[in-house]
Image: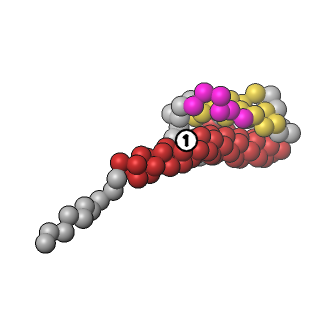
């Protein structure tokens, strides 16, 4: 006597698994993208705060506004960020991601 039991998954089981994976991906991808954007903004904010602290220190020592070179600011990738120092504020802009910028005042 032959045993004709088939092994494997039925089409319905595969479709249910695919739907579950699609729902999880539909929820996870926007959450992940928001997390990445928040981290980019936090990184720019930290750089701006560090630049403002350096600018404040320079201003206290010399009583003049610093230039970008006076900040001695370490940037992980200098081509990625734009640093602007104006009278009383430091602005950092992420050139790779539009809208990611932060300004901190000093003095």
Q: Residue at x 57, y 31 (%)?
A: 97
Q: Is residue 46 left or right of residue 82?
A: right
The magenta region covers 97-102
In the picture shown, does residue 79 fall above or below 58?
Answer: above
* Most foreground residue, 61 or 20: 20
Q: Quadrant of the N terminus?
A: bottom left
Q: Residue at x 54, y 45 (%)?
A: 23
Q: Which residue is mark 1?
A: 26
> Dot 1: what SS?
helix
- Percent across and percent down for residue 95 are 56, 29
Is disc 1 surrounded by few (<14), some (14 to 19) or many (20+) residues within 10 Å?
few
Whether the magenta-drawn stretch holds residue 40 is answered as no
Q: Residue at x 68, y 32 (%)?
A: 101
Q: Position of residue 19 (x, y in %)?
A: 48, 45
| Residue 100 covered by magenta stretch | yes
Q: Is residue 37 left or right of residue 23?
A: right
The vertical placement of 1 against 84, above or below, is: below
């Amino acid at each position: 006597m032959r045993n004709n039991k088939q092994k494997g998954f039925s089409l319905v089981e595969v479709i249910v698994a695919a739907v579950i994976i699609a729902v999880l991906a539909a929820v996870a991808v926007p959450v992940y993208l928001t997390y990445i954007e928040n981290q980019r903004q936090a990184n720019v904010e930290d750089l701006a705060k560090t630049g403002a602290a350096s600018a404040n220190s320079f201003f206290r020592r010399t009583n003049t506004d610093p230039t970008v070179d006076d900040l001695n600011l370490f940037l992980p990738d200098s081509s990625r960020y734009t640093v602007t120092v104006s009278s009383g504020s430091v602005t950092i802009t992420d050139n790779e991601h539009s809208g990611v910028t932060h300004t901190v005042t000093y003095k």
